[in-house]
Amino acid sequence: MSTVAVGVIGASGYAGGELVRLVDGHPNLHLQVIAGHSSAGNPLASVHPHLSGGDRVLASQDEALAAEVDLMFLALPHGASARPAMTLLDRAVKVADLGADFRLADPAVYEDAYGSPHPFPDQLGTWAYGLPELDRTRIASADRVAVPGCYPTSAVLALTPLVAAGLIDSAAIVVDSMSGVSGAGRGVKPHLTYGAIDESVKAYAVGSHRHRPEMEQAISAGSGTRTIVSFTPHLVPMQRGLLSTCSAPAADGASADDLEAALHKAYDDEPFVDVVPDPPQTRWVVGSNRCVMSVHLDVHSNRAIVSSAIDNLLKGAAGQAVQCANLMLGLDETAGLPMAGWMP
Amino acid sequence: MSTVAVGVIGASGYAGGELVRLVDGHPNLHLQVIAGHSSAGNPLASVHPHLSGGDRVLASQDEALAAEVDLMFLALPHGASARPAMTLLDRAVKVADLGADFRLADPAVYEDAYGSPHPFPDQLGTWAYGLPELDRTRIASADRVAVPGCYPTSAVLALTPLVAAGLIDSAAIVVDSMSGVSGAGRGVKPHLTYGAIDESVKAYAVGSHRHRPEMEQAISAGSGTRTIVSFTPHLVPMQRGLLSTCSAPAADGASADDLEAALHKAYDDEPFVDVVPDPPQTRWVVGSNRCVMSVHLDVHSNRAIVSSAIDNLLKGAAGQAVQCANLMLGLDETAGLPMAGWMP
Amino acid sequence: MSTVAVGVIGASGYAGGELVRLVDGHPNLHLQVIAGHSSAGNPLASVHPHLSGGDRVLASQDEALAAEVDLMFLALPHGASARPAMTLLDRAVKVADLGADFRLADPAVYEDAYGSPHPFPDQLGTWAYGLPELDRTRIASADRVAVPGCYPTSAVLALTPLVAAGLIDSAAIVVDSMSGVSGAGRGVKPHLTYGAIDESVKAYAVGSHRHRPEMEQAISAGSGTRTIVSFTPHLVPMQRGLLSTCSAPAADGASADDLEAALHKAYDDEPFVDVVPDPPQTRWVVGSNRCVMSVHLDVHSNRAIVSSAIDNLLKGAAGQAVQCANLMLGLDETAGLPMAGWMP
Amino acid sequence: MSTVAVGVIGASGYAGGELVRLVDGHPNLHLQVIAGHSSAGNPLASVHPHLSGGDRVLASQDEALAAEVDLMFLALPHGASARPAMTLLDRAVKVADLGADFRLADPAVYEDAYGSPHPFPDQLGTWAYGLPELDRTRIASADRVAVPGCYPTSAVLALTPLVAAGLIDSAAIVVDSMSGVSGAGRGVKPHLTYGAIDESVKAYAVGSHRHRPEMEQAISAGSGTRTIVSFTPHLVPMQRGLLSTCSAPAADGASADDLEAALHKAYDDEPFVDVVPDPPQTRWVVGSNRCVMSVHLDVHSNRAIVSSAIDNLLKGAAGQAVQCANLMLGLDETAGLPMAGWMP
């Protein structure tokens, strides 16, 4: 089988580095161009000394936008994807955007979450939301896919089947998530120094995180039921891994078996989602494209609780982007994606 | 001022080591006897090489029970405090028990949580619950105090003023807590090895943790309102520190200002509790006896959220025990207790 | 190309888990049998929840010894490989032993290092030492290969070319190494708990570690010059990665360029060894089978210093074992071995 | 006893924060003024949320230089202490400088190490070197003390008694040190982010670190023997703690007992230095002002090895500064200094 040419714009970040690593190891993709911003003109090894082929030189974004590729991965800060995406689509290059620019369908929700109007409001709603377990058909026929955020991936997979089955109260969901530090990106900021992070945990963006409307939109779309989420993210001293503890009042008569059955029905045929009896550790999935979850009924409070773990940089970013690209390009959905994680 | 003789039984664990350190530095207490179990007969340095006076020899429990002290700290596994406590009380020695044996007032609740009937059911309810911010008068007049668990300390302090003020729905509370590993004790177990913990986070005891009934009892007692909590603890890769994210539906009309005012009213005169505007990091309190919390109103979901941080070994165990002992012995409540933490 | 059947005995440890992961992803190997000891009869997921194919059942060692395989990997505690290795060789099964049982060529040196006579002293010296960069020809023709220890791999690669070129004093070498905790194995021991390891570093086995004679033997054999090493290992709070700081007095007139040239000459054609200008971080190699090193001349003390980094479980154990197996089976030496690491 | 007024300039860094904490808890010192640079005008809590008295406002350096104090602690980047120190001395304020500006006695050595001529070369050699265990008499009579660097403190204490006793070859010393990240300061730099540090170890400044000439100067001065050190520092993923593995060829006939006896003789009466039989962990000393060391003779290579552990921010910085200040002010040398560390 011949290979498909793809590129990565935004390669110098953590998700960008993982995209390079995954595409390099992919049996059907060829990495035609790698672009950075401040790192343009420098060898890959200068930003990712752990990768092979470190002497490949990073292109500028403009060079990458002109490259002959079938699909481009964009791994840019939010707000920075919109224009290059339009340029690529005009050239009939498919786009898998890891940023947040095209995830929300409603311009008003976008403006409320991101603080300014969307530059291309007509685009909103025309992009496929890149969570294959919810709607892989749409992704497979799309030329533009908005890859979900890390927190939404973990929570939407955990909750949608339960909401869809009417087993929980979709208006009283609480999602408390814990993320490794790579989820905050590779910026050099006071709150991301080792001194500020190590041996500490904190909540942040309480009640105001931008992934909340994304969760609500995706669960509502996937279940057909309007959903309200109270979301609190936490930063945990580890490089990778994301755990969401998702809970909601159980519907009258819903049993633990009902909850577990709904998740098994949704995911038993999914290659990357496992439903297990005991709460997962994030390390079970770090390094893989898997999501592992367990569901519990707290009979005392009659609350359903799902514990859902992903690698924020793989199933929560670069891995999911490759999964979407596989669908968009007509490849095996699992091609080039690790099923096994790294331990210890 | 002359000093008061005290002892520590269970000195070889983490909380026991902190008790020794605090009492050694206390201006009004004298550490008369230090007892261990398997470490009895060995020098203190063999179990706590970081402490000074490492050549002091650990006594057996029996020797400690016969020692001439005014107050004994018990830092033993749950189930192991009951009998030595009875012996000490018979000798008119005051007891501050860091274990769970005498925290619950209802024998049925105890049996449900701990899986076997209480050996001294008549004692339940006669012990003061050692959270001074809730009821320091009872502690000051008690000869037997059950020092709260680490998770309850963080959550009860966060929620009780809000329940008492009628600002949240006490029947729909969710507490998602994250603890450093020292909270699991010093046991040598597969799930506590570095290989199992580092770079990973997990939920555990979902819906079944023994600190849930303790939280409900204390919030109910402190607020006069029956309370139901759904509690999920998580293990985070750090030595110390505990963060509880406590949420509940806000009462109709309750504003963010109302929530903050209720906490300020409760704690502005408290030496060890600080209400701050932004979510605290656990490192702000590690090393100190402080509890630092922030409260937020998620207007989208109309949910009140309190982020509450303590050092699980100090305000969550040994520090709080010394605070109680200070009250029981008529000393300054803050004597010997660190107000500043350690950073980085 | 058809695949070759191999097996892993000792699969429940960390190196064993990495062997399973590497063989599962290897294009030319088929994992015929996976054996554990106390885990025999249980599914793979019970010991390695991060691996795929978790429902594969672990065989007993006896079952594995009777399996139809061309090559067996042994990942057992030292002392435990000798007998199963003999059984396998009698059945004409090739053996790649990750343990220490057959690394040393001299029975007296073995007895001095390991404290008891070798059960099969005649075997010593008949096994190939599995460091392909030193002598891949011998490995390629061997049916029995002793895969090197993690510390020796890092230090022998760093020092042998310099000793061979007469650039350093081989009688005054100092190797100070720092290892991640997985190097100590998966045992459940007090000194390996999270509480004992996190936020601490220590030296251990000062002057007495068993890898010292192995280093000396390999450098002496590889360089033709008798070598004496003073070796101090350190335990560092991280899961994986190993760094050796190797130094020795520089020979008269040896320049920094001479040192660098000697390493480049030795390794520029090697797929898994990179010589770089600046001291490497262990994270550059964790997840890969690479060794990355830099060499420096401290002109003040006239001492040559090599900083050499590997992943202790890959180039220091399972990866190197697969590299040897590739040679023993006539496969491409790099087949199935990761060239890129994991970051962050 | 009345208290002595002191101040801290450079309070916003890690060592500055520890100075504030130590002085706040000191029975004989009163913290008259706390100064920062970019943080001047802001409350202490804005830079050190873990400290008590967080509403104290940071002064500017100019304000602090005019304050009525008996002694000023300077915790500034290297190069920044010289001018304020001169100003203070002109005002007859004693100075304990935690920076490197006045540690080296020889202007040529200073210029070689720091890359530019010293602004006050006549001062060099007139400052006492603030390692009380080497020469507390000079410190006690000095009005200007240069507090040693963290690496030198650990190595000089380890090696000086052995050199002085003629037990090791002072011309062939190797010091390989491992430091927690706080040793690199609180700067916001790419190589100090959590992403760059966690789960990794590296050597840096190989053969060129500025603490090497300081070590040589102090050991030479303390022993009367010219000393040459080859020094390689390493960065280890932990907040605090510093371990130096110091080795040198043993003199002919020197036994392990001789080595141990020399250290015991030097330190058995010292309050802050402990000689123990087994290699110390850094966590035994973190939080205390102690240095704990063990000495070993590697009979195979005939090399003496000392493993020496300190808290880089206490005995390696702020604690030692307070120890010096106690001497300079005629107070008990141990006043206000913690003898017990923090564990876990």
Image: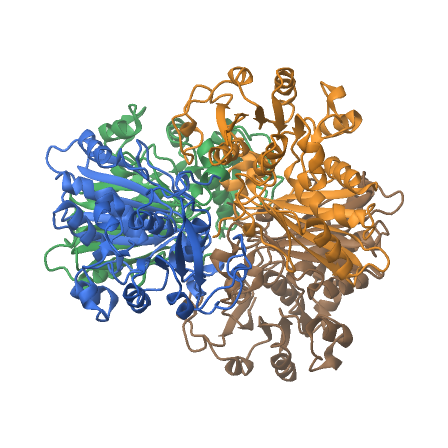
Chain colours: A orange, B brown, C blue, D green
Q: How many marks?
A: 0
Residue C238 at least partly seen: no
> Residue A160: x and y, percent?
75, 45
> Residue C204: x and y, percent?
32, 58
> Residue C136: x and y, percent?
24, 46
Rendered position, D233 above or below B155: above
Residue B94 shown left or right of residue C334 in the figure: right
The residue closer to the viewer here, D189 or A159, is: A159
Residue A337 at least partly seen: yes
Res. C249 image quadrant: top left
Q: Residue at x 20, y 64 (%)?
A: C123
As drawn, which residue projects farthest toward the front?
C2
Residue A334 shown left or right of residue A175 in the figure: left
The residue closer to the viewer here, C188 or B12, is: C188
Residue C141 shown left or right of residue B165 in the figure: left
> Residue A327: x and y, percent?
63, 34
Residue B173 shown left or right of residue C160 in the figure: right
Res. C280 image quadrant: top left
The residue closer to the viewer here, B11 or C168, is: C168
